[in-house]
Image: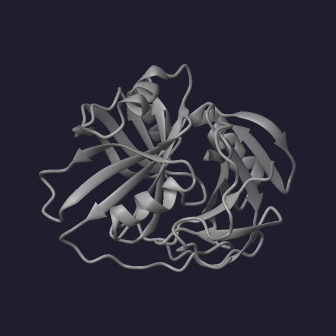
Amino acid sequence: MAIESVLLNVRDVAQSAEFYTRHLGATVISSSPDAAELDLVTARFVLTRVDAPAESTWIGDDLQRGFRHVGFKVADLDARVSALHDAGVPFHLEPINAEGGVRITFFFDPDGTLLELVEGPLQYHEVHDQQAVDRDWGLGEPDRPRFDHVAETVADIDRTTEFFAELGYVRMAGIHQPSDDRGFEITFLRAGDSSLEVFTYDRAEKQERTPQLDALGFAAVAFGATGTESAPTAGAGGGSVALAVGTLLGQDVRTDPDGLPFIIASA
């Protein structure tokens, strides 16, 4: 089951839709004052207006378990960064050359969702599934920004790998961070044409976060069948799926072991 949609809670649908079309090349599938659906090449973004949002407990510290950011592949990072600066968009990290031979930057959308741009094919330090890597690289340089991954921090990479294996994910590859004394490693779990980018910190204490479905920003991911598997049962994930924590789009929201909210998209 690959990521079919990324669900975002927004204050102003038109403003957020304009942001994603202007800065990330999204195309509008449908739009109303209450909701919009955008095409980001390999996934849809579903924007839902929230009139009285809860105060978000998300912290821009990767030691907080659960959702971290949404990533896009681009061919023209510096040009897009220049346009973002001209528009006064707040940045979390200015462009840098990162491990794996890529260039990256982080900034915020109008409702506080952390976004990443990645330029260049990632040169993985270790490969677990060459076929998945070949498919990843085979997507090539994007003509317009392409949704690439959702990142989360977890406590136990083996538990996370086992959990998502039941949703059709394979452990594709990894990137080391030798300059980070917190024991930072990145593991990529792959399904379809996007990844779950999983952060672990073996020498640092992590904090838990209770999932929020009524705060602005990232709400959940929706997994959809790729055609090679059926929808998992309520006990998928080695029996470690949390009880439903609420509903989005009329469907139950569950979490992985570290609090990443998700729904299984209806067929």
Name which quarter of the figure residue 124 lies in.
top left
Q: Depth check: 29 or 261 in front?
A: 261
- Image coloring type: one colour
Left or right: residue 174 versus residue 208 is: left
Q: Depth check: 71 or 261 in front?
A: 261
Residue at 21 percent across and 68 percent down: it is: 202
Name which quarter of the figure residue 214 lies in.
bottom right
Residue at 40 percent across and 25 percent down: it is: 134
Residue at 68 percent across and 49 percent down: it is: 16
Left or right: residue 262 versus residue 205 is: right
Q: Please say if 2 is above or below 251.
A: above
Residue at 35 percent across and 26 percent down: it is: 120
Q: Residue 183 at x, y = what percent?
A: 18, 62
Q: Residue 226 at x, y = what percent?
A: 65, 39
Q: Please say if 144 is above or below 227.
A: above
Q: Answer yes or no: is residue 115 visible.
A: yes
Q: Depth check: 187 or 44 in front?
A: 187
Q: Residue 12 at x, y = what percent?
A: 74, 57
Q: Answer yes or no: is residue 141 visible.
A: no
Q: Residue 61 at x, y = what percent?
A: 35, 67
Residue farthest along the right direction in this orientation: 32
Number of numbered discs on residues: 0
